[in-house]
Amino acid sequence: ADAETGAIVALDRGAGAYVVTLVAAATDGREATAVATFEARAADFPRVSVAPRWTGDAVVANARLVVDASLDGDAGEATYEWTAAGSFVDGAGLADVAATRVAGDAVVDGATTVQSLVIRAGALVPGATYAFSLRATWAGAAD
């Protein structure tokens, strides 16, 4: 996704193995790099998409945080699990601060199924950095 607009960048290169490197640079010269390796397959496999409901690179620590996710694919059942890296207030875990379920079952009906993560107001630590991930599995194949 484009860091400024949130737009999804599509790679239309066909099946094969790919390495994507993302470099984020701040105006003060700091940089962070992330590398992802993935295999693109010719079949239309289920997809998981995650999109935050905020803009910019920071949120107010005492505000409610919502991360929308969608599960797309052929009809069937899926299991999902949210994970988080980062410390919450009072050392709480993700399940303690989430107002929504962090794991469970979802029915995918061939259209987009939304499975959002909502973090309660006041659960974030000021100045902390968080990374939220969603893993969904259809019939034994992880996405």
Image (tube, rainbow, N blue to C red):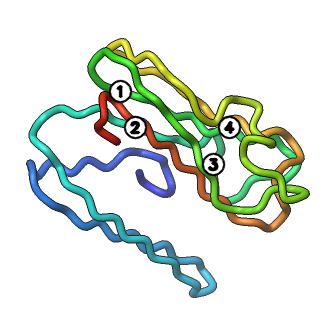
Q: Secondary structure at mark 2?
A: strand
Q: Secondary structure at mark 1?
A: strand
Q: Which residue matches tag 4?
A: 66
How packed mark 4 is, by other alpha carbons closer than 10 Å (few <14, some 14-19, many 20 or more), is some
Q: Which residue matches tag 2?
A: 48
Of label 4 and label 3, which has the lower sequence position? Answer: 3
Looking at the rendered structure, the number of numbered marks drawn on it comes to: 4
Kindly indicate the quadrant of the structure image that contains residue 140.
top left
At label 1, the amino acid type is Asp
Residue drawn where x is 41% and y is 51% of the image: 1
Q: Are marks 1 and 4 in contact (CB under 8 Å)?
A: no
Give me the C-alpha separation between circle 1 and circle 4.
19 Å
Residue located farthest toward the top when viewing the structure as drawn: 109
- Vertical position of residue 119 compared to residue 5: above or below: above
Give me the C-alpha separation between circle 4 and circle 3.
12 Å
**Mark 4 or 3: the one toward you:** 4
Of label 2 and label 1, which has the lower sequence position? Answer: 2
Kindly indicate the quadrant of the structure image that contains residue 89.
bottom right
In the rendered structure, the answer to whether residue 61 lies left or right of residue 36 reads: right
Q: Which residue matches tag 3?
A: 55
